[in-house]
Image: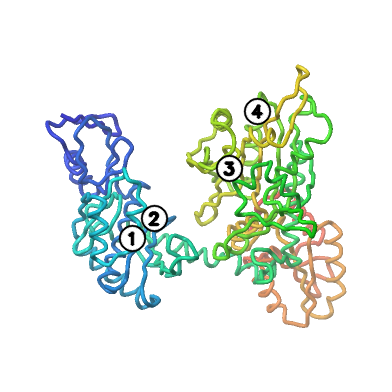
């Protein structure tokens, strides 16, 4: 007689084994209709799953994140079923859930076209309307291999061979279609309504460039049409905000094949980049951080000693001198900071000792993964390392967490999530050391009054970390800052200080990056503000325009006056109509357009317009300067619409 405990604590007893769908029906007809899966003792299962002993149970619907994942996984199978019906010669491989959707890889004799995608999506809707029941069965390994080989699905047979011996082999069927999958899946195809195929791309089998090239069809799926439409609208808005497009329009930066994954910064883009550095330099300086600089190229022996070579070597760039001595371009700044710490004798009185660097690092990323400023091979970190005694770790972690959140607030990011990443499979250090580091970091976050979600196995190879995830203006999440506890690397590199007891002690090292990558943070800012950067960040804060040549000298004088007060102001004296110039600088998203006609030149004033077309009327030059300086110094988003 299983006793089922529901999320609200209530219990239901049954005289015999009971399915998830039966429990849902007993609770209510509405829940039974909405049920997509169940969660039994923390494990996701199909609604057909039978419970034969006492257990906790949650009914999963499209309102749950896990329910949406079940929908996406099931829609990937719906896609494969449609492809096989329309293109029987295609072979199926894998179809996992990804962020906001799913994909499925196929082997086919020719590329799928846009017309093919439309036909496939139409067939998927037909299969959804048919409301085919989804069933699960278990097969022996040999029978499953034979089943798929008989169907000509050699990729599926290969996948089965790679499944661990003790793992159950399960197959899911719907109509005439059967696929290998561990599940769970929706009860029937009629649950799959809100989906859309997005694009097709190439992908190597098992991600190995030595293997066959497959075709990957991407799609998105949601719990209802409203959510799907909202997502597609968000994609349209994201396309308008694409930092690569805006970067070209605003003449900020470019990329070219001679330096893949490295940025060519133009004057205005470099001004923005340096403004970010100046901000961080001031901010961290007030918090007790000392700026340092370590070499970009260092002997491979150092990277071997630090543990980077063994755990990160495949992502590093190497060079060899004529004397056969091998060096690496630094992928991280931490070993260099330990070398600075190691110079001279350090005392417990020196701690915490905080080093910061705007360090240029290089990491190999596959060409297909590069994406504008968001994914590069050469980038600058606002990196910092705090060396502390073990009993200082807690307070330092709390202070750093608050420091990072304060920075994001200055840039208009108030919706920040924190993820806690614990030990990865590939790591250095003993489990005891990891236990200490993980416990300290968790306690620090809790003490700061913050909540976090778990990100299992995603810590750095040398220690656990916190990841700070920013939500932007259109609801997208961006992982930026990190805070990592390291009880391993200082000891590996011989760092020590003299304690109060006169003995040598190994310091704990806290790694922190607040922007993360300056390149990536710049790209996020451009997209977050749709190119309309706050006045204090804008590369050009105002432009002064003349109406006729008669005001040219006045415009030059006013521009110089404003520049002398530390403002980034330019003039536009081209022999063009003022309307044309206003439109051009509006497209450049310059915060303020200052227009001079004869009346303004005669009264030492300027007509003020915003980039959003708001007319603020004529203002004295002195008042304009005060207004701009106030916006810059307050670092507010200002009254401008962004």
Left or right of 515? Residue 417 is: left
Where is residue 469 shown, x and y percent of the image? 55, 47
Q: Give the residue number, with chain letter if any, for mark 1.
A: 76
Give me the C-alpha separation between circle 2 and circle 1: 8 Å
Badge 4 marks a residue whose secondary structure is: helix
Where is residue 260 shown, x and y percent of the image? 65, 67
Give me the C-alpha separation between circle 4 and circle 1: 47 Å
Mark 3: few, some, or many residues within 10 Å (few <14, many ≥20)?
Answer: some
Give me the C-alpha separation between circle 4 and circle 2: 40 Å
| Res. 295 mark | none
Q: Is residue 465 above or below residue 226?
A: above
Q: Are marks 4 and 1 in contact (CB under 8 Å)?
A: no
Is tag 2's residue or tag 3's residue first in the polypeptide sequence?
2
Q: Are marks 4 and 2 in contact (CB under 8 Å)?
A: no
Give me the C-alpha separation between circle 1 and circle 3: 32 Å
Q: Are marks 2 and 3 in contact (CB under 8 Å)?
A: no
Q: Give the residue number, with chain letter if any, for mark 3.
A: 460
Q: Is residue 147 above or below residue 358?
A: below
Is tag 4's residue or tag 2's residue first in the polypeptide sequence?
2
Left or right of 101? Residue 210 is: right
- Residue 601 appears in the picture as rendered: yes
Is tag 2's residue or tag 1's residue first in the polypeptide sequence?
1
Q: Give the residue number, with chain letter if any, for mark 4.
A: 395
Q: Nearer the viewer, residue 551 or 465?
A: 465
Q: Are marks 2 and 1 in contact (CB under 8 Å)?
A: yes
Picture residue at 78% right of the left edge, 57% below the top? 623
- Residue 642 appears in the picture as rendered: no
Is tag 4's residue or tag 1's residue first in the polypeptide sequence?
1
Picture residue at 71% right of the left edge, 49% below the top? 300
Q: Give the residue number, with chain letter if any, for mark 2.
A: 97
């Amino acid at each position: 007689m299983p006793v089922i405990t529901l999320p609200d604590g209530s219990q239901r007893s049954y005289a015999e084994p009971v399915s998830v769908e039966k429990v849902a029906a007993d609770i209510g007809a509405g829940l039974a209709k909405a049920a997509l899966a169940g969660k039994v003792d923390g494990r996701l299962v199909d609604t057909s799953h039978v419970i034969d002993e006492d257990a906790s149970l949650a009914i999963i619907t499209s309102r749950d994140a896990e329910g949406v994942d079940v929908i996406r996984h099931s829609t990937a199978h719906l896609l494969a079923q449609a492809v096989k019906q329309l293109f029987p010669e295609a072979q199926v491989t894998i179809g996992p859930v990804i962020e906001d959707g799913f994909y499925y890889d196929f082997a086919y004799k020719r590329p799928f076209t846009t017309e093919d995608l439309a036909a496939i999506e139409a067939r998927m809707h037909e299969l959804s309307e048919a409301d085919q029941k989804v069933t699960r069965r278990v097969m022996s390994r040999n029978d499953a291999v034979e089943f798929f080989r008989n169907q000509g699905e050699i990729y599926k047979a290969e996948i089965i061979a790679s499944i661990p011996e003790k793992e159950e082999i399960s197959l899911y069927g719907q109509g005439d279609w059967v696929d290998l999958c561990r599940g769970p899946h929706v009860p029937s195809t009629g649950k799959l309504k809100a989906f859309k195929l997005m694009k097709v791309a190439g992908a190597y089998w098992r991600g190995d460039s030595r293997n066959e090239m497959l075709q990957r069809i991407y799609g998105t799926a949601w719990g209802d049409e409203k959510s799907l439409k909202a997502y597609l609208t968000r994609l349209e808005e994201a396309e308008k905000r694409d930092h690569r497009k805006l970067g070209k329009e605003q003449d900020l930066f470019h990329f070219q094949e001679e330096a893949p994954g490295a940025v060519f910064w133009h004057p205005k883009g470099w001004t923005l980049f340096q403004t970010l550095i100046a901000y961080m330099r001031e901010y961290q300086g007030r918090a007790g951080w000392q700026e340092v600089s370590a070499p970009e190229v260092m002997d491979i022996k150092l990277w071997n000693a630090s543990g980077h070579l063994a755990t990160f070597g495949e992502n590093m760039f190497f060079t060899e001198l004529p004397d056969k001595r091998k060096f690496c371009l630094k992928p991280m700044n931490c070993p260099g900071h330990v070398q600075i710490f190691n110079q001279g004798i350090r005392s417990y009185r020196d701690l915490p000792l905080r080093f910061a660097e705007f360090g240029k690092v290089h990491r190999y990323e596959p060409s297909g993964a590069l994406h504008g400023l968001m994914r590069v091979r050469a980038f600058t970190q606002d990196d910092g390392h705090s060396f502390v005694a073990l009993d200082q770790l807690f307070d330092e972690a709390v202070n750093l967490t608050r420091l990072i959140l304060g920075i994001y607030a200055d840039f208009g990011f108030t919706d920040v999530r924190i993820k806690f990443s614990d030990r990865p499979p590939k790591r250095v250090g003993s489990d005891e050391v990891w236990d200490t580091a993980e416990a300290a970091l968790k306690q620090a976050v809790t003490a700061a009054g913050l909540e976090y979600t778990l990100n299992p196995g995603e810590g750095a190879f040398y220690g656990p970390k916190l990841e700070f995830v920013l939500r932007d203006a259109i609801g997208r999440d961006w992982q930026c800052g990190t805070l990592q506890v390291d009880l391993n690397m200082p000891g590996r590199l011989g760092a020590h200080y003299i304690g109060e007891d006169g003995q040598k002690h190994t310091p704990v090292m806290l790694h922190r990056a607040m922007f993360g990558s300056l390149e990536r943070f710049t790209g996020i800012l451009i997209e977050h503000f749709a190119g309309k950067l706050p006045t204090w960040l804008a590369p050009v804060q105002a432009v002064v325009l003349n109406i006729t040549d008669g005001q040219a000298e006045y415009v030059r004088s006013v521009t110089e006056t404003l520049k002398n007060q530390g403002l980034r102001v330019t003039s536009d004296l081209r022999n063009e109509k003022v309307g044309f110039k206003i439109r051009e600088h509006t497209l450049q998203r310059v915060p303020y357009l200052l227009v001079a006609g004869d009346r303004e030149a005669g009264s030492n004033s300027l007509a003020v317009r915003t980039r959003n077309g708001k007319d603020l009327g004529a203002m004295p030059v002195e008042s304009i300067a005060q207004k701009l300086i106030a916006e810059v110094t307050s670092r507010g988003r200002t009254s401008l619409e962004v």
